[in-house]
Image (cartoon, rainbow, N blue to C red):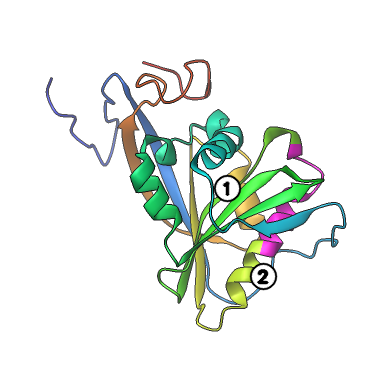
Amino acid sequence: MAEAKLELNGYTEVPDGKIAMVVTYLEMSEARLAPPVQDRTDVLLERWHRPDLDEYRKLFREVGEDWIWFGRLTQTDAALQALLAEPARENYIPKRNGEALGTLELNFADPENVEISYFGLVPKAIGGGLGRWLMSRALEIAWTRPQTRRVWLHTCTADSPQALGFYQSCGFKPYKRAVELADDPRLTGILPRHLGRHLPII
């Protein structure tokens, strides 16, 4: 099969078995919190110091499988364990009555440029302002570190259609785009074929 040629003006054919996504990078370059939210007594944000791999993958799937999150699911046990154990990487879980409602991962590897690596809620927790509350906690954690000069994250066209607008409403500004191609995880067996109907399998 001939290698696909990227057309900067026009259409680029995506090979069968691949998915293509437009990635938008967003940043916040001055210390601020998301628009004010009411404090919540029904939810706690807990630090997840040593994630169990099975529990981590289960929650990762629950939060992200509708949006074709697959990056962490392709990693071996050893690779994932090593990544989650990195001292600069912090995982948090919003919980209600002991039940996990989502995931938050912050990466302080570059202490001046803090990355929100993963952010999301389980489907039943979406709505009711929990996402905005979780983002306010994420920004609070990031900006209280004295070295922080910028907080950044990225989203893509495989993600929830509300994600980009949500991040912008929280104060993030787009600064870069990229095109990502990957093997379709529904064809490699990582995710079930019925997921992600907004990205047809070809």
Q: Position of residue 201 (x, y in %)?
A: 41, 17
Q: Position of residue 124 (x, y in %)?
A: 74, 33
Q: Tell me the distance, in whole angstroms, between the alpha carbons under discs 1 and 2.
A: 20 Å
Label at residue 52: none
Query: Magenta stretch mostly in which secondary structure?
Result: helix
Q: Is residue 22 left or right of residue 131?
A: left
Q: Quadrant of residue 143?
A: bottom right
Q: Which type of secondary structure does the marked residue at label 2 adopt?
A: helix
**Among numbered discs 1 and 2, the one appearing first in the sequence:** 2
Q: Position of residue 47 (x, y in %)?
A: 63, 60
Q: Which residue is mark 2?
A: 140
Q: Is residue 99 left or right of residue 73?
A: right
Q: Which residue is mark 1?
A: 164
Q: Amino acid at mark 1?
A: Leu
Q: Amino acid at mark 2?
A: Glu
Which residues make up the magenta segment?
Answer: 125-137
In the rendered image, the vertical position of residue 78 relative to residue 11, given as above or below: below
